Amino acid sequence: MRNGVPAEQPKVSVIMPVRDGERWVAEAIRSVRDQTFAGFELLVIDDGSTDATPAILAQVAATDPRVIVLRQPRDGLVAGLNRGLATARAALIARLDADDIALPDRLAQQVDYMQRHPDVVLLGGWATIIDENGRQKGRDMRPSPQALRSTLMKKSPFIHPTVMFRAEAARRVGGYHAAFEAGEDYDFWLRLADIGEVAILPELLICYREHGGSVTRTRQLRQIYSARLAKLAAAARQAGRPDPSTALSAPPDWHDPAPGPFERDSSRLFRMLELADPTVAATIPASAVDLDAITSQLRTLTAGERKFAQAAVLNLLRRGGLPVPHTTLWRLLLRLGPVKAAKLLLGDK
């Protein structure tokens, strides 16, 4: 109820977390308000913004009862997503980031598809890449809608701000899990796929903004670490075993001297992948260099993990002074990929 008048039940709840998003949040909200499909509510979760974002949100909410602002201290993205999920009134939930733009027919197309395919619990789409000024960068993200389940067990084929999913299914699997920091979406997709069908609508649904707030090397490493754990958990569930990730209440620290059995091997591997940072590689004690952590996992390394491993071994080669023969490091570097090894040695990272 708003202003004493019962609010109409929305068919779609759009969830948009934001923190200090004054530059683009008004445009993102406008793209939702201008949808050809009108039966929505927009839940904007303000994660402790200290810029002009709160004032922008208050002004919009005062003029459009479909826009509902939820405020929280700086609890982070997962907390904001789960708060939006808990508050949402609609049976369908759509995501949009506060720096992206929904194309006018985005909701209409996805609602139509979900109505015609009641077995689908998660629906993605395509995105056009734009720069920070809204100019197209000449390319699109068009993940293949084919063989989604096999692809999903290797990597995420979904662009998070394009997805629509069923609220009942999302709540049944427990929403987003904080333990999978930077990879919480991938873990969520895998759990949704446990209980229903997944699909990608081969249509451009949003403009996805790439801008100066680039992902750091540390966050990239955390993202692929979380992805590895999410895949291991999914494999256990599919084999009929208990989900080993339920013991995790927070993102694991791969430096933990007493890791749990679920994350032990992955943590050992990622302590070595962290050496892709030259500063870390230069300061690690020689006794902590554990090449077997990489070689024992060589067959299972993803492209992202392999890239970090190559850079880590190259940094060890450049450092020198280790009780590891250079020939051993060379052999490992070549096993990780001879072409990439040559590029790294030439300084082409």
Image (cartoon, helix red, strand yellow):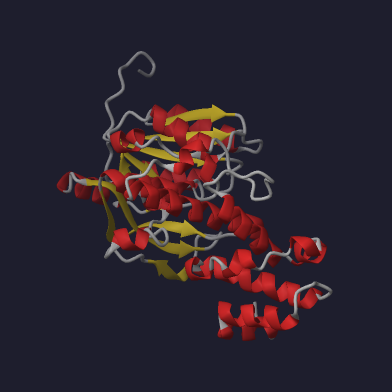
When the figure is inspected, residue 55 is found, relative to residue 132, above or below; the finding is above
When the figure is inspected, residue 264 is found, relative to residue 88, above or below; the finding is below
Q: Residue at x 30, y 46 (%)?
A: 194
The residue closer to the viewer here, 278 or 202, is: 278
State which quarter of the image contains the C terminus: bottom right
- Please tell me how many numbered marks the rendered image carries: 0
State which quarter of the image contains the N terminus: top left
Residue 256 coordinates in the image, percent (x, y) = 67, 45
Horizontally, residue 251 falls left or right of residue 238, namely: right
Q: Residue at x 57, y 80 (%)?
A: 335
Residue 195 coordinates in the image, percent (x, y) = 27, 43
Q: Residue at x 74, y 72 (%)?
A: 316
Horizontally, residue 180 falls left or right of residue 170, namely: right
Residue 203 visible somewhere in the drawing = no
Horizontally, residue 273 falls left or right of residue 147, namely: right
Residue 17 visible somewhere in the drawing = yes
The residue closer to the viewer here, 275 or 108, is: 275
The residue closer to the viewer here, 234 or 62, is: 234
Residue 159 coordinates in the image, percent (x, y) = 41, 56
Q: Quadrant of residue 332?
A: bottom right
Query: Which residue in the rendered view is the most extreme toward the top?
Result: 4
Residue 323 coordinates in the image, percent (x, y) = 79, 72
Horizontally, residue 306 falls left or right of residue 4, namely: right
Q: Quadrant of residue 192?
A: top left
Q: Residue at x 43, y 54 (%)?
A: 231
Query: Which residue in the rendered view is the most extreme toward the left?
Result: 116
